[in-house]
Amino acid sequence: MMNKRAQRGMTLIEILIVIAVMAVVIIAVAPLIRTTWVSWITADRRDEILETGRAGLSKTIREIRTAYDIYQATDTAYLDYYPQWSTGSAGLIYRFNYDAPNVDYEFGVATPAFSPDSLAAPVDSFSYVTYTRGLDEGAADRQG
């Protein structure tokens, strides 16, 4: 007869039971790992979109604040101005379009023809809302 101490090791049934238990554990944990991965991807994309929006708005604010003068403000949909880095009268007039049909946001060169300028990354949509206070014709702006 063989000594029981000499029969160390695992039987085939024990190995199959361990494999079955591990498979159940992996199947139970897999959806949690997938949900975590999808949440991370969604948050990463949201951060990228927010950063792109911030970059576009920051660029617009910086350009308008440092512009030398407003070139033309007769059209209600556009604001044309010379940016600070413009080369004088030979410089390009930039146009900020905040009310274009079917377009939420446009920024680019107004002369000779309007050509959109690229922001930090591709932008699917960018909303810009302006509020104006109504004035009586010929009346001064009232505090209030």
Image: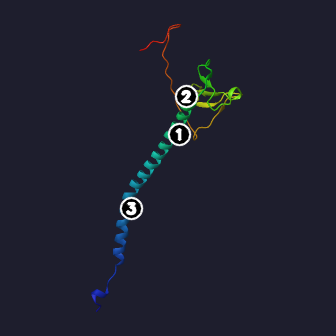
Point out residue 54 in the picture as x, y percentages from the top left corner: 51, 37
From the viewer's perspective, is residue 70 above or below residue 117?
above
Dot in front, 1 or 3: 1
Q: Nearer the viewer, residue 85 or 36?
A: 85
Crowd rating for badge 2 (residues with CA inside 10 Å; few <14, some 14–19, many 20+): few
User: Considering the numbered disc 2 on the image, is that residue within a helix, a strand or a loop?
Assistant: helix
Which residue lies at the image location 55% right of the left edge and 32% below the top edge? Answer: 62
Q: Amino acid at mark 1?
A: Thr
Q: Residue at x 36, y 67 (%)?
A: 20
The answer to whether residue 24 is left or right of residue 89 is: left
Circle nearer the N terminus (1, 3): 3
Of tags 3 and 2, which is closer to the observer? Answer: 2
Residue 120 image position (x, y, % from top left): 57, 40
Circle nearer the N terminus (3, 2): 3
- Colour scheme of this structure image? rainbow
Tell me: 72 left or right of 19: right
The residue pinned by badge 3 equals 26
Residue position marked by numbered label 2 in the rendering: 65
Give 143 or 136, whichever is nearer the viewer.
Answer: 143
Residue under the image location 41 percent in, 51 percent down: 36
Q: Is residue 125 visible?
A: no
Which residue in the structure is indicated by mark 1? 52
Mark closer to the chain start, 2 or 1:
1
User: What amino acid type is highlighted by mark number 2?
Assistant: Arg
Mark 1–mark 3 Cα distance, whole angstroms, equals 39 Å
- Check residue 128 in the rendering and tell me which mark sits there, or answer none: none
